[in-house]
Image (cartoon, rainbow, N blue to C red):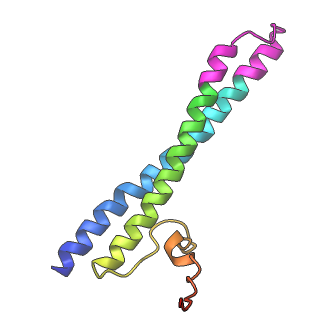
Amino acid sequence: MLNQRYAAAKAVADELLPAERVVDEAIVHNARLAIAVVEGRRSANLPLTTGQEGLDLVVQANVRLCEARGLLAAAHHAFRQTQSEVGLRAYSWGDIQECPPSKAETRAPIPLSIVA
């Protein structure tokens, strides 16, 4: 059963880490697209409003990509908690640094008080 849990965790990690990288790459490419729109308009000496609607959409897309990145990071932490719950140790699968602690791990303990 431990091998099955390990295989399931590895299958999730094998998909999660590439998903994180792809979203980062998409953010970078989308930011370069926004730069190309602005620089293209300036180099062509076109009015400021040229391409504005498209630029607005590109920027909105990048905001959503950044939101997706945050959601993937939150999912990563949630899966780390699940990994602990099913009795598997956490391993570093991605970057060389340890995963940052989850919100639950960094939450300050609630002080107890006596109520009369």
Q: In the rendered view, tell whether residue 76 sits above or below residue 51.
A: below
Q: Position of residue 114 (x, y in %)?
A: 54, 92
Give the magenta range: 37-57
Where residue 4 sits in the image (x, y, percent)?
A: 18, 73
Q: Main secondary structure of the magenta part?
A: helix
Quadrant into which the N terminus falls: bottom left
Depth check: give the residue in front, 65 or 33.
65
Q: Is residue 30 left or right of residue 75?
A: right
Q: How far across and how far down the image is residue 74, in percent?
A: 48, 59
Residue 102 seen in the current view: no
Vertical relation: 23 (above or below) 44: below
Judging depth in this view, the residue of 97 and 87 nearest the camera is 87
Residue drawn 71% across the image and 24% down it: 36
The residue shown at (59%, 80%) is 108
Residue 26: quarter of image: top right
Could you tell whether 3 is left or right of 64 in the image? left
Would residue 12 be found to the left or right of residue 22 on screen? left
Residue 42 lies in the magenta stretch: yes
Across and down, in percent, residue 58 comes to 61, 26
Q: Residue at x 69, y 12 (%)?
A: 51
Residue at screen point 56% across, 83% down:
109
- The reply to whether the magenta stretch includes residue 66 is no
Q: Residue furthest front?
A: 116
Q: Is residue 38 above or below residue 51?
A: below
Q: Toward which corner of the image does residue 60 lie, by quadrant?
A: top right
Inspect this view and state whether residue 67 appears: yes
